[in-house]
Amino acid sequence: MTHQVHAFEPPERFVAGTVGPPGERTFFLQARGGGRLVSVALEKVQVSLLAEKLEELLTEAQRRFGVELPEAAAAVGDNDPLDTPVDEEFRVGTLGLAFDVDTATVVIEAIAVGEAEAEVELGDADDDEDEDPDEPDDDLDRLRVRLTPEATRAFIERARRVVNAGRPPCPLCGQPLDPAGHLCPRHNGYHR
């Protein structure tokens, strides 16, 4: 089976975004460049962790290699919606991050969910010593993006805005509030 590597080094635009109303949103990473548009679906927690780990990567690159980091953007950056059409190329199973010292760029790689990951999620994984479960399969589709520290900082800020733009949390239990309210465990199941 052949796999595709969608490489954008660098992209014209690389953002995290959503489609759908709060509570039913589908999260995407979208890269545009060279007349191509690639959108990959992922979970909200993956977007949140990606922003967090990118921030840690930039801090470590500054500490270890003396990379000049831009300050956090005071003004709102790219707040445009995702480019259309938003066609899902694949669902992300693994995210990889690296810092290329030679070019002073951040490399983000989103790798598709593989059959082994799907089996692990279902609890049907075999104990096979020949394969390392921590190594992503080379036969999986991937999205590879190379960003400058400035573009990485802009991506982090937007990703955080997208994650925080969902449903507000309940002040008592912290679970997301639907427009019609929710059954709050802190109220013994009464509708709040």
Image (cartoon, rainbow, N blue to C red):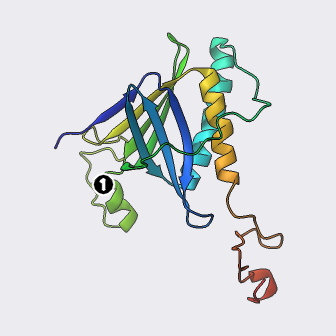
Residue at x 67% of width, y 11% of height: 66
Query: Which corner quadrant holds the N terminus?
Result: top left
Mark 1 is surrounded, within 10 Å at the Cα level, by few (under 14), some (14 to 19) or many (20 or more) other residues, namely: some
Q: Amino acid at mark 1?
A: Ala
x and y percent of residue 62 in the render?
67, 18
Write down the quadrant of residue 22 in the picture.
bottom right
Q: Which residue is mark 1?
A: 116
Query: Which corner quadrant holds the C terminus?
Result: bottom right
Residue at x 64% of width, y 35% of height: 78
Is residue 67 or residue 91 the one in the foreground? 91
Figure check: 39 above or below 150: below
From the viewer's perspective, is 169 left or right of 58? right
Figure check: 116 above or below 168: above
Figure check: 159 above or below 150: below
Write down the quadrant of residue 157 in the picture.
top right
Is residue 30 or residue 52 the one in the foreground? 30
